[in-house]
Image (cartoon, rainbow, N blue to C red):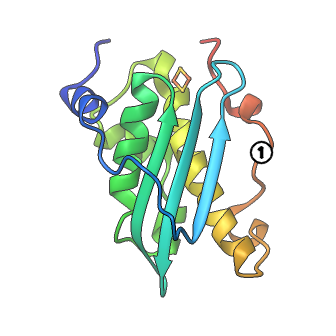
Amino acid sequence: MAYSEKVMDHFANPRNVGELPDASGIGEVGNSKCGDIMKMYIKVEGNTITDCKFKTFGCGAAIATSSMASEMIKGKTIDDALKLTNKAVMEALDGLPPVKVHCSVLAEQAIKAALADYYRKNGIDPELFVGKMPECDEDHCNCSL
Ligand code: FES
């Protein structure tokens, strides 16, 4: 399965690349098997994610999924951002080859990690909302596919 035009577009012209110096939450996740790392920055005002930036050191699918995921949560409420799944990100990109599904999992986890950091910074136990963040994503990793 080849990459869709949308994947190629978000890989070649990723949206929201960079850092947010005044981020409300920062999440960093990595895949221990492929070694790729994704760092997501969110700015929260009221209950809304007003800005989102990312830095991804990884494969093309990881870059495309973090770009799309950042677009999808910008302007959303925290609750809606928490519901974003890797499946929704993949659908928005018109699909990914099966061996690249784990890259989209990284994007979902990076957003959850950033939201967990936001909760933590506000004195709220993130597990109540985000669930348990894996220390390492090996359990979720399908790299060997
Ligand atoms: Fe590691 Fe895509 S995230 S190969």
Q: From this view, report whether residue 24 is shown above or below residue 1.
A: below
49 left or right of 27 in image: left
Q: Quadrant of the N terminus?
A: top left
Q: From this view, report whether residue 30 is shown above or below residue 15.
A: above
65 left or right of 118 in image: left
Q: Identify residue type, mark 1.
A: Pro
Q: Quadrant of residue 120?
A: bottom right
Q: Nearer the viewer, residue 127 or 123?
A: 123
Q: Quadrant of the C terminus?
A: top right
Q: Name the residue rendered at 41%, 38% in the picture.
A: 65
Instruction: State the SS at label 1.
Output: loop
Report which residue position mark 1 lands on: 134
Q: Quadrant of residue 136?
A: top right
Image coords of residue 5 (percent x, y)? 19, 27
Q: Name the residue rendered at 50%, 27% in the picture.
A: 101
Image coords of residue 51 (percent x, y)? 39, 67
Image coords of residue 141 (percent x, y)? 66, 27
